[in-house]
Image: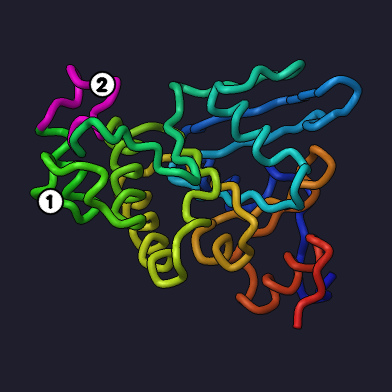
Amino acid sequence: MTASLTLSRDATGVPSAARRAAQFPLAVSVRGLQRRYGERVVIDALDLDIHKGEFVALLGESGCGKTTLLRALAGLDQPDEGQIRAPERPSVVFQEHRLLPWATLWENVALGHETTVGRSGAAHALAEVGLSGRENDWPRNLSGGQAHRVALARALVRDPALLLLDEPFAALDALTRIKMHGLVKELVARHQPGVLIVTHDVDEALTLADRILVMRAGRIAASFQPEHHTFDALRSALLEELGVHAH
């Protein structure tokens, strides 16, 4: 571990989280979460708080439980033990945009909430992601980056308290990914949801997150706050936590 870094092993007790707790309500609170597949424990007595307006990145090796945790928070997987407390059902953006090809863009954005969101709400959400005037267009006419913009508009159109991102930019080219990072930061600052992004990209976590968690063997093994460290020092520390030597 880089000597200049102060590492918190408690994902819920770091200083900026305490400051945020005084200002923002919880978007989600997890206590004692456990998920087993047969005899294998995938999530083991995990605790986690995310406040509204807080952007949390979750890193870890494949198979450590990241996606299982995200699915549990999304209500897509039932834990065996523990509690998940959230004010409402979260919105989720997956690696695939999952747009309905037979529906227009505004219909995709308002999907499931047509009566409350409506065409005008969907149009506003599309304008927020840079697709103003494209309400009647079809998914087949979009680039990969534009399709992911629509997926973001669909996720944020209801102003959710919690936004879950499951490697949403992994399939995009490097330039489009950089643009999407800027868009996501802008939208999160505007809508103030609590955010959890699952990613394998250390640089993406450093670019986006207020707090970076490293998951190992079903538990939060380490917690870092980028504001307390230089980019290069924290990048090296994260790579070391992930078992990779920085060059």
Span of residues in magenta:
106-119
- CB within 8 Å, label 2 to label 1: no
The quarter of the displayed image where residue 211 is located: bottom right
Residue in the picture at 64% in, 49% down: 58
Q: Residue at x 19, y 26 (%)?
A: 117
- Residue drawn at (66%, 17%) of the image: 78
Image: 4 above or below 171? below
Q: Main SS type for the magenta part?
A: helix
Residue farthest to the bottom?
247
Q: Residues within 10 Å of mark 2 (few under 14, many from 20)?
A: some
Q: Quadrant of residue 120?
A: top left
Q: Quadrant of the N terminus?
A: bottom right
For marks 2 and 1 on the same chain, the one whose residue lies earlier in the sequence = 2
Classify residue 1 as left or right of residue 47: right
Residue indicated by mark 2? 113
* Image position of 137 with respect to 228: above or below: above
Q: Which residue is mark 1?
A: 132
Amino acid under label 1? Ser
Give the quarter of the image for residue 200: bottom right
User: For residue 110: magenta?
Assistant: yes
Nearer-the-camera pick, 203 or 2: 203
Task: List x then y, in percent, for residue 121.
Answer: 15, 33
